[in-house]
Amino acid sequence: MTGPLPGENRHVLRKSPLSLSILLDEIHAGKIQLPDFQRPWKWDDERIVSLLATVTLGYPLGVIMTLQTGGQGTRFKPRPLSGSHVPPGTEPAALLMDGQQRMTSLYQALRSDGPVDTTDSRGKPITRWYYLDIEGALNPLASREDVILSVPADRKYRGIGDRKQVLDLTTLEAECTAGLFPLRLAFDAEAINAWQRGYVRSDDSRWDTWGAFQSQVLKNIGDYYLPVIRLAKETPKEAVCTVFEKVNTGGVPLNVFELLTATYAADPEYFDSHGEDFQLPTHWQQVKDQLAEHRMLRIEDSDFLQAICLVSTHYRRRGRPDVNPFTQPAASCKRGDILDLPLGEYLKWSPEIVSALHWTAGFLMRQGVYGSADLPYRGQITALAAIRTVLGVETDSRDVEDKITRWYWCGVLGEQYGGSPDTRLPRDLEQVVGWVRGDREPASVTEANFPPARLNTMSSRNSAAYKGVLALLLRQGCIDWTYSKEPINSTIFEDQQVDVTLIFPKAWCDKNGVSRERKDSIVNKTPLTNRTRRIIGNLAPDAYMRQLETEAGLPGNWLDDIVGTHLIDARYLRGRRLPGQQLSRPDFDGFYQARSEKLLKLIYDAMGVTSDAASDGRASDEQR
């Protein structure tokens, strides 16, 4: 039978039971191996004992799944199961997609020639042999797991009766005398016969016990079958990845990087020209090392692959009649596209993307983004790297960078990269490149919107727009209130521990009835050094302004000008005199309204929104 059964998925070659004995023989011979993207075997001693109990009782163990090798679309580097000493270069007939933990445990415990390397319940590495207490196994009242003994590598067991007494199981005679059958012999007929002779040699009454053990226990092991789903070699790579994730519910989902690792390592052309497999994890580590100097580049392996895929597909699909950047972009970075990314294309574009990421770091610094925690959207790094790669030195033009900058801020302040980037990334690449070269504005620019009321709700560092406003303040040259030598730059940001602080501190707001929404809003926050934040503390604004004058040694009007670089009118901090009062008090309402207007202008300028449009937006927002 070579095709799928009636009603089965077309990728299923066969669904049938296979004996455990044959499966373990094929693992031993290397006919069944693992795809290299499978994570390491990790079952602990307790789970192995439970597994062995299941098999010796003849209970069902669940389905395993294999993938037939030889398909062009599913060429993965194989590796033997842990503990199987398969000769290097052995080509498997099938790859084990689901069942690694179970089959590795069974192989090491029942078929290999050595002890099992596992861990105890605390994760400490241990090495074990597994024995079955014959009389205990025949006792219907005994738990099977309780009569399977986990014995240390030296085969000296401490666990029966007096724990000070050591049971030595280093010889066949000692095993037979103790009545403990070594499960490593379960599929070795000659060894079982030799062990049986030793077991009954000293006592003829043991024949009956052995006969019962053989029929009730060993037969369960020898006749054990597992249901096997065999995937055909024609199964697409993306389907393999999806299938693996669906069946691997007990582990961490497989990602595209791990799948490509196994695919690239099996590339024959690379091996023929270099004499070794291509190691994607090693190459990715080299990339990370090259980019480590840029603190704001919080980039993952998936981002790097997406950037390469965007550029690769952009160039490979250009010129097709159905390609339109506003409806069907040439570029794409969906899961299937990345899985189909040839190693040659990866190697071609990888250095270009690395160079573009260095440029991206500089671009982000010019936008006031100095640290990874302050990066509004990780996905925009991917887009920027792809745009720079396609445009090249064109981005060095002032006009071109202005367009890219406007696109960037529309994405940040319009909060457009919060969902899946699979659709937006290709569209932005194509449309920004087209815009630079004379086409119309990208949809990300024309569709961007920032309602004025959004300022009131921006209170969390998790918000991209929140991070964006803080970056805009840094970009436009705000100066710290004590470290006032120059505007806050990347060096000051790092060395002086710049962070966000409340302009009107919490204690003052709580005492004066300021709502939580306005107190925590970005309007009441600004980036300052650690020294300035300590001085401000919980002091009232007028009090900390006097304190800052003393600490910084600045005249009051100078300090007011410095505070103004944060779009804050210092008069509202120092206070105004109210009728009937001898002393002035800070004015939160006046401050909040004045700064909101200045922040909105800063935002609209970055997005390229005209003053008329901004006014219309404020009016419509008030009407809402």
Image (cartoon, rainbow, N blue to C red):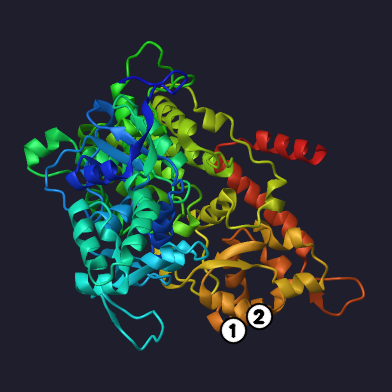
Q: Secondary structure at mark 1?
A: helix
Q: Quadrant of the N terminus?
A: top left
Q: Which residue is mark 2?
A: 546
Q: Position of residue 336 (x, y in %)?
A: 38, 30
Between 399 and 458, the residue placed more toward the observer is 458
Callout 1 crowding tier (Cα within 10 Å): few <14, some 14–19, many ≥20: few
Between 250 and 538, the residue placed more toward the observer is 250
The answer to whether residue 333 is visible is: no
Between 30 and 396, the residue placed more toward the observer is 30
User: CB of mark 1 within 8 Å of CB of mark 2?
Assistant: yes
Residue 96 lies, with reference to residue 215, above or below; the image says above
Label at residue 236: none
Q: Amino acid at mark 2?
A: Arg
Residue 616 lies, with reference to residue 143, above or below; the image says above
For this orientation, the residue located farthest to the bottom is 164
Specify whether 413 is left or right of 193: right
Residue that appears at 35% across and 69% down: 150
Residue that appears at 59% across and 84% down: 550
Q: Position of residue 484 (x, y in %)?
A: 49, 71
Between 408 and 327, the residue placed more toward the observer is 327
CA separation in Å, label 1 and label 2? 7 Å
Q: Which residue is mark 1?
A: 550
The answer to whether residue 204 is visible is: yes
Q: Amino acid at mark 1?
A: Thr
Specify whether 558 is left or right of 287: right
Count of marks overlaid on the render: 2
